[in-house]
Amino acid sequence: MTALLAVARYEFRMQARKRSLWIAAVLLGGTLVVLQGDRGPRSLPVGTPAREVMATWALLFSILMPLAYGMLLADRLVRDRRLRVEPLLESLPVGPVARLGGKYLGGVAACGLPGLAALLVAAVTELPKRHDPALLGWALVAFAVVTLPGIAMVAGFALVCPTFLSVPLFRVLFVGYWFWGNMLAPAFLPSLTGTVLTPIGDYAATWLLGSGQTALFAGTPGLLPFLRPDPSGASAALSVAVIVLCGLIPMTAAALAAHRATRQTWPAKA
Amino acid sequence: MHIEIADLRRRFGRVTALDGVDLTVSGGMFGLLGTNGAGKTTLMRILAGVLPATSGRVVVGGNDLSTRGGRVAVQRRLGYLPQELGLYPDLTPTEFLDYVGLLKGLDDRAARRGQVGDLLDLVGLSDVAGRKLKGFSGGMRRRVGIAQALLGDPTLLIVDEPTVGLDPEERIRFRTLLSSLAGARTVLLSTHIVEDVAQTCRQTAVLAAGRVLFTGQVTDLTARAEGVTWEIVTAGSPPTDGVVVSAIARTDGTHYRVVSPRPPSPDAIPVSPSLEEGYVALMRSATPLPVG
């Protein structure tokens, strides 16, 4: 447990210090703020419930900011080999599962930092207009149910996939997936958009909006109808759970493979 | 810590890196010599539990390294400085050592920090303890490397080519430091620089093409060149018979030291050999070199 937390702590520290994380977050988040248009949170009338305002902000930031997280996390696991730290780490009495888990937790925490900061800044800038301190509380809730599960899923794939794909190839595929699987209308082309699997947080944001309207495409008819329940609190919870579990699938596969490799033995005689 | 290696083999595809290595290390400072590609790093990595062998028996301090439990037990008492040590450029030496300390199981925060500070003092990096590692020179990085290896006061220290890339002053400082650490520990020093072993080790082994050519006292290796080491002073062309180990130009001509089974010229006089010459004599006897 100590080793897991140690890896998580230092992984978080190293990533949170990366200027590229913050620059990418500011650029992508800033672009969305500027280009949000009439459907964006700034256009919501005064008197809109704080919960709805912050859900809209969380969804807005979730459109592009996870792209930055995926890009940045893609080299975190292969980096140890590139930096030649791996032989040293492998000589320490710590199993690869703890190292992998620590990297995951640290990566999720580090990428969550700009996501949380963006929502808190949004809440603070909304305060003078809406005079509702509940905005801050709903910012935290929106972060927990809309932003964080998506980061958890992105982190799982971004850490593990580049170990068998190249980092640049993963990044290209990831960008393609992100737009196809989160924002491409199901009526336009078969896609995962609108299913409980969308890490953009469509179902959770729809539940937070609570006004009967769909945040993006949650529940819209399309491919794999069994993954498109009607939006509700239960389907939002299901979506959060499924998204987090999806992120854990590649992590579990990688952990099992690493665990198996470390248990390798050899015969005394050839 | 006693190390017993028997019939150790390691293949990488069709390449045989270790071909039936038998070796016993009892303690103190032990030098592992060999040319590049001799299999030293493979052997060090197996001993550090980083790389599995293909077959063979390796017992370190009573722990069988062919089992996961044995490897972990050794790693708990191990300090390892890999040949090409990478560091996280965005951490400071203090942070890097703290991180490695945590992974070595040094859970007591105050004790760990105290040890990190002491080791940074020992390797002369206290002044730059708060600077990011990305700006460090090769020598400074090596010093961070030895500091991390010493965390947790290991009883077995494995250092793989630790002086490569260091300037002469740093090499000497590093060798002295390693020697001073050997007291109660077993220190395995892998190198292709004979001088490093000559200055620090009493016991040594020579590896070539994955096999042990020699194991024993450093003085015994030196003795391999007794009677076959010659000095020639000449203003003319260098001797062509034997292996020229050194050539120093002086006012009376160039002083050549040559390892050869027979006098390389009528003027050649026999001299006492150095370890380097013993090593050359051994390698020459193992792999006949072109003569003349």
Image (cartoon, coloured by chain):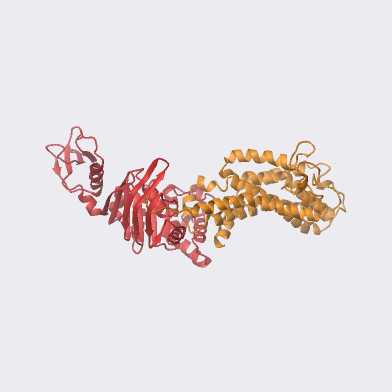
Chain colours: A orange, B red
Instruction: Quadrant for the C terminus of chain B, please.
Output: top left
Q: Of B9 and B202, which appears nearest the observer?
A: B9
Q: Is residue B5 left or right of residue A21?
A: left
Displayed quadrant of residue A241: bottom right
Pick whichever, B84 or B247, lies toward us. B84
Where A14 falls versus B262 (above or below)? below
Residue B93 as seen in the image, left or right of residue B62: right
The answer to whether any part of residue A85 appears in the image is no
**How far across and down, in percent of the image, does residue B41 sit?**
39, 48
Q: Is residue A250 left or right of residue A198?
A: left
Asked whether residue B204 appears in the rendered view, the answer is yes
- Percent position of residue A255, x then y: 57, 53
Image position of B87 with respect to B268: above or below = below
B162, A256: nearer the viewer:
A256
| Percent of width and height locating residue B233 | 16, 39
Return the x and y of residue A71 as percentages of the image width and height.
63, 43
